[in-house]
């Protein structure tokens, strides 16, 4: 018996590879994988009979499949010698079964079409789905998902207990969900190196399929060193719940600067995508096929979340053959309503409002507030021809490339048309103060690939309010000299921050009320003052004075987060390496963001020498309130003169390593809200300068 080659009770040889010549041909392999998956408890003789081979041939086949990591074998108690062993497909086996089944069906369809043409002289018109969907439009037929059956998922959950685990980031969970539910079809997993390189360079997978954005699994160096291609790993959410198994095919180190330049158009950390690549993403990418076990759980707005196949089923049920999708990451105002009405009328389609609720641009209004705004506006749309569904997508803000990507995603969700507006998925200004992308660059690129995407673009330009007509028009349709009104996003935020009137011609009263509830005037919001500078610059002294002045004013609780104090109580286990200093600063940033979110004032006094870390903290806090960076620009010579602890002296003698300003750099803030110098200046004056800045920003009352 082949089984004597293995020792049970030890870890199965799940990650070994067998030469392809030892595996059966694809058709036989499919039959055997299906049989072992559906009847794992069958005897060897019954299994051999089911697939039409001899018992000896079966033993050889299973032995090769075990070596290839497709099947695991375990001993089973009992007196029946014919049923001493049970079989189970590994994650790799499940993925291989799905892959081969797809290839088998595709080949049979080609054979059928060729035979039909030979006999009748015409194409078969055969629809590659079950008979009940033969008359469906392509946008309404089901698309492939990567989930296994419930029974298989339960087996894999048990098996995965012995696999290395990677806890996914929020962005990776967004990507995984759309990979598994078909939103990223035709991808079958995270990109391997060949596909990654091709997507970065040409916007296509290695086989030539259009796909403009690299979908990669970045991991840290320690985890990368612990795994190898040919191995399976469990992918878990942040609570440790398993979501999928990745069969690693590739492990590679990307050129992130080149990726940023090609995908985002520039290697600039002012771009959220570039900043993510250089300062958040891990240094190593893992690629390979996914086996979906369960979808991520969302506890919010569950009735509004639909998979691609659920939306296709909904459209099919209502008879919606033409569907135009409108994407947004901002609240809906009256201009958006007019735009969507025009788009639906222009292409005679039903309307899908499809906002993104995954990860958008840092500083955007949170998705909870936005969805409440969307629901408040839905009453303004005809319910018979409009629906809304939430998309858990992690945006890259990649402008033209992202527009093409969004089109592919909407096609997968059953849409036939897609609205692309001005500066679609644009991140704003670059480090030089210029726009990253041309205003209508996204429309131009989408039009170039429209036929290949398989979805029609509905282009729209900027809309303005025309007073004489008491309605909205496209800006390029308005006659010269006509009196038009418009409120920019910046102006809207200013009016909200200062409690000023927002006219009804611009937005809906219910939307404004919701925004005011979430974003009260700045003088009632929480905020963070972030002092940064060299050791001995006077940060803590000014911070203490500021705390007293703010507490004297009253109105909001004030918390001082001093670097040395926080290190003592929250980060006592950390050293002073760059990594450990970053961790300490991010912890303080997190605490400050929670204080800000809950309407308090956080005063931070830290060296915080690195631009990237300060930027990360700013993004963390600005989701909830203002971030006021104060650079205490005291010179290193003055700091050294004040040094009562003798730290600078020890650093110059080499007794303290990586000391900021001596053996480790201090990266001067480029755009601090305020710069103060304590040399020859009273502390009270410096604190008063900060108060005046806070007053000018509307953060404290006049």
Image (cartoon, rainbow, N blue to C red):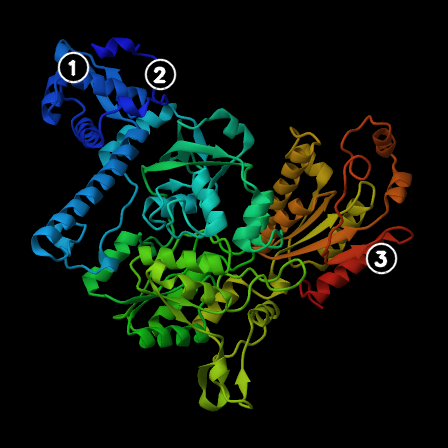
**Residue 304 coordinates in the image, percent (x, y):** 33, 57
Q: Residues within 10 Å of mark 3 (few under 14, many from 20)?
A: some
What SS does tag 2 mark? loop
Nearer to the camera, 658 or 71: 71
- Note whether 677 is above or below 57 in the view shown: below
**Residue 218 coordinates in the image, percent (x, y):** 50, 38
Quarter of the image with the N terminus is top left
Q: Which residue is painted at 83% across and 45% down in the image?
A: 537
Q: How far apart are marks 1 and 3 (CA)?
A: 91 Å
Nearer to the camera, 483 or 509: 483
What SS does tag 1 mark? helix
* Mark drawn on residue 56: 1
Whether the residues at callouts 2 and 3 have beta carbons within 8 Å, the answer is no
- Note whether 198 is above or below 411 in the view shown: above
Q: In this view, does 573 lie to the left or right of 338?
A: right
What SS does tag 3 mark? helix
Q: Which residue is painted at 34% across and 13% down in the image?
A: 10
Decide which of tag 1 and tag 2 comes sooner along the chain. Answer: 2
- Counting the numbered discs, the total is 3
Q: Name the residue under label 3.
A: 685
Q: Quadrant of residue 700?
A: bottom right
Decide which of tag 1 and tag 3 comes sooner along the chain. Answer: 1
* Mark drawn on residue 606: none
Q: Name the residue under label 2.
A: 11
Q: In which quarter of the image is residue 384?
A: bottom left
């Amino acid at each position: 018996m082949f089984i004597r080659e293995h020792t049970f009770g030890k870890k199965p040889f799940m990650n070994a590879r067998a030469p392809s010549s030892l595996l059966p041909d694809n058709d036989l392999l499919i039959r055997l994988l299906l049989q072992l998956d559906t009847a794992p408890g069958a005897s060897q003789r019954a299994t051999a009979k089911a697939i039409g081979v001899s018992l000896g041939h079966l033993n050889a086949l299973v032995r090769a499949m075990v070596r290839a990591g497709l099947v695991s074998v375990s001993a089973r108690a009992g007196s029946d010698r014919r049923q001493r062993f049970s079989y189970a497909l590994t994650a790799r086996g499940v993925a291989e079964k799905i892959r081969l089944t797809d290839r088998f069906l595709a080949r049979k369809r080609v054979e059928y079409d060729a035979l039909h043409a030979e006999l009748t002289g015409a194409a078969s018109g055969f629809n590659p789905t079950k008979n009940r969907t033969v008359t469906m439009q392509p946008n309404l037929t089901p698309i492939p998902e990567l989930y296994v059956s419930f029974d298989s998922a339960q087996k894999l959950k048990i098996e995965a207990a012995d696999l290395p685990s990677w806890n996914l980031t929020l962005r990776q969970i967004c990507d995984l969900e759309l990979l598994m539910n078909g939103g990223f079809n035709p991808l079958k997993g995270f990109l391997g190196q060949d596909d990654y390189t091709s997507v970065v360079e040409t916007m296509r997978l290695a086989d030539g399929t259009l796909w403009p954005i690299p979908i990669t699994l970045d991991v840290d160096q320690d985890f990368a060193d612990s795994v190898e291609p040919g191995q399976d790993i469990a992918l878990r959410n942040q609570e440790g719940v398993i979501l999928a198994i990745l069969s690693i095919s590739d492990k590679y180190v990307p050129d992130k600067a080149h990726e940023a330049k090609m995908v985002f158009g520039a290697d600039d950390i002012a771009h959220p995508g570039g900043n993510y690549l250089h300062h958040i993403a891990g240094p190593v990418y893992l690629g390979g096929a996914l086996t979906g076990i369960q979808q991520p759980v969302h506890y919010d707005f569950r009735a509004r979340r639909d998979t691609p196949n659920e939306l296709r089923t909904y459209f099919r049920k209502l008879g919606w053959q033409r569907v135009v999708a409108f994407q947004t990451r901002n609240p809906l105002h009256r201009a958006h309503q007019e735009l969507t009405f025009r788009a639906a009328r222009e292409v005679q389609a039903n309307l899908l409002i499809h906002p993104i609720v995954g990860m958008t641009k840092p500083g955007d209004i949170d998705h909870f507030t936005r969805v409440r705004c969307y629901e408040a506006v839905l009453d303004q749309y005809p319910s018979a021809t409009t629906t809304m569904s939430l998309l858990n997508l992690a945006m890259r803000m990649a402008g033209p490339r992202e527009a093409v990507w969004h089109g592919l995603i909407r096609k997968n969700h059953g849409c036939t048309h897609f609205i692309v507006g001005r500066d679609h998925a644009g991140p704003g200004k670059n480090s030089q103060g210029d726009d990253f992308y041309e205003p209508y660059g996204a429309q131009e690129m989408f039009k170039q690939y429209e036929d290949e995407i398989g979805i029609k673009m509905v282009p729209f330009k900027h809309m303005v309010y025309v007073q004489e007509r008491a309605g909205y028009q496209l800006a390029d349709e308005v006659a010269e000299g006509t009196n038009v009104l418009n409120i920019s996003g910046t102006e809207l935020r200013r009016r909200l921050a200062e409690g000023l009137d927002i006219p009804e011609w611009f937005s809906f009263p219910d939307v404004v009320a919701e925004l005011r509830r979430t974003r009260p005037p700045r003088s009632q919001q929480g905020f963070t003052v972030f002092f940064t500078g060299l050791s001995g610059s006077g940060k803590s002294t000014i911070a203490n004075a500021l705390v007293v002045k703010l507490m004297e004013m009253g109105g909001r609780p004030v918390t001082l987060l001093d670097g040395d104090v926080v290190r003592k109580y929250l980060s006592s286990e950390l050293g002073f390496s760059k990594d450990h200093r970053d961790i300490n600063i991010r912890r303080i940033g997190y605490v400050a963001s929670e204080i800000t979110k809950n309407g308090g004032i956080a005063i931070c006094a830290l060296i915080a020498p690195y631009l990237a870390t300060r930027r990360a903290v700013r993004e963390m806090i600005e989701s909830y309130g203002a971030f006021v960076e104060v650079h205490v620009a005291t010179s290193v010579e003055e700091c050294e003169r004040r040094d009562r602890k003798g730290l600078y002296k020890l650093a110059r003698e080499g007794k303290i390593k990586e000391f900021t300003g001596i053996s480790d750099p201090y990266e001067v803030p480029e755009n601090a809200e305020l710069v103060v110098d304590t040399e020859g200046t009273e502390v009270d004056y410096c604190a008063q300068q900060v108060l005046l800045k806070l007053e000018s920003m509307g953060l404290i009352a006049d």
